[in-house]
Image: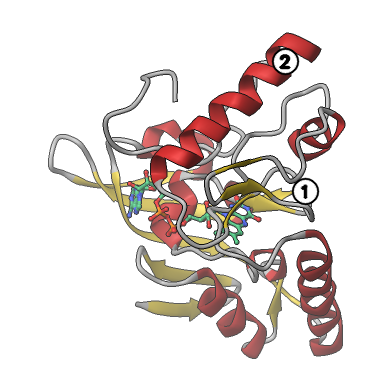
Amino acid sequence: MLEIQGNHLTAGAGVRLKKLVSTAVQNGLGGLEWMDGIPGNVGGSLRMNAGAMGMDMVKNLVSVTCLDEDGEIRSHTREELNAQYRSIPDLVHNFVLQAVFEAQPAPAEEMERLLEAARARRKLSQPVGASAGCIFKNPPEIPAGRLIDELGLKGACVGDACVSDVHANFIINRGHARARDITILIDMIRKEAKENRGIDLKSEAQVIGDRDPQF
Ligand SMILES: Cc1cc2nc3c(=O)[nH]c(=O)nc-3n(C[C@H](O)[C@H](O)[C@H](O)COP(=O)(O)OP(=O)(O)OC[C@H]3O[C@@H](n4cnc5c(N)ncnc54)[C@H](O)[C@@H]3O)c2cc1C
């Protein structure tokens, strides 16, 4: 479900961000172009408060309708949500059904320019191989990728799981990496960051399954 009314787009939880952006642009509405390269749907991206280029999902949000943990369907305005960096904790137990996003009328050339800029930036700064996106949240002191690079860990591997040469906050599966290889590599990076720089790296990617609860 994806509908437009004035400057507002109402999207079901399963709508891909790419579709949300392209529909907005086709209808002369801008401000969502930054979402274009993020592989995700509206529901999961809101839960993660996905972001890029200084923006995040909650900044474009007007309201979200959820199946709340008590089984009721309720709408919540942006102001009612306790949004954080890469997380909206209110959505852990409240399942997103649909959300309303605000965009602004914008010239077609300007939106195209912003889309191209976002794509070019991703192409230059992110690896092409199989990955889960950024592994760690950026700590306040330094972007996680730069920190891992400074620790000399670019290219470090456990099995086929390797720290990307292009962007050190990405772990690439070079072919046959197992979940265990990736979590061992994550632990190695966190240990180095703590021991050498006193920084506690927090995971941005969620690890599901039988795992150390601090993840
Ligand atoms: C190559 C690559 C690049 C990436 N770039 C970025 C980036 O630039 N910025 C960024 O923030 N992330 C990025 N990511 C990470 C990821 O794509 C985003 O976080 C994305 O928004 C997740 O959306 P999803 O639909 O895949 O959610 P999922 O991964 O399926 O789910 C994420 C979480 O949300 C929960 N969830 C799913 N649906 C709902 C719902 N309807 N209601 C409530 N909770 C729900 C899930 O249970 C899970 O806990 C990248 C990933 C990759 C692989």
Of all residues shown, which one is farthest toward the front? 159
Q: Is residue 83 left or right of residue 141?
A: left
Q: Earlier in the sequence, mark 1 or mark 2?
A: 1
Mark 1 = which residue? 54
Instruction: Identify the mark at residue 79; answer none if there is no mark.
Output: none
> What residue is at 56 percent from the left and 84 percent from the top?
23
Q: Position of residue 125 (x, y in %)?
A: 81, 59
> Which residue, given by chain and number where applicable, does mark 2 sit on?
199
User: Are there few (<14), some (14-19), or many (20+) residues within 10 Å of tag 1?
Assistant: few
What kind of element bears circle 2?
loop
Mark 2 vs ligand 1: CB below 8 Å: no
**In this rendering, would 80 be left or right of 38?**
left
Q: Quadrant of residue 206?
A: top left
Tell me which residue sits at (47%, 40%) in the image: 181
**What's under tag 1, amino acid-wise?**
Gly
Q: In this orientation, does residue 203 appear?
A: no
Report which quarter residue 84 is drawn in. Answer: top right
Residue in the image at 51% along x and 71% along y:
9
Residue 74 seen in this snapshot: yes
| Position of 45 relative to 211 (above/below) | below
Q: Nearer the viewer, residue 189 or 96?
A: 189
Count of numbered badges drawn on the protein? 2
Q: How far from the left and from the top, in percent, is residue 61?
A: 55, 54
Distance from label 1 to label 2 (Cα)?
23 Å
Residue drawn where x is 77% and y is 23% of the image: 140
Query: Which amino acid type is marked by label 2?
Result: Ile
Compared with 67, 112 (above or below) is below
- Observer-nearest of 51 and 60: 51
Q: Position of residue 189 (x, y in %)?
A: 65, 27
Residues packed near mark 2 inside 10 Å, few (<14), some (14 to 19) or many (20 plus): some
Is 179 situated above or below 96?
above
Mark 1 against mark 2, which lies toward the viewer? 2
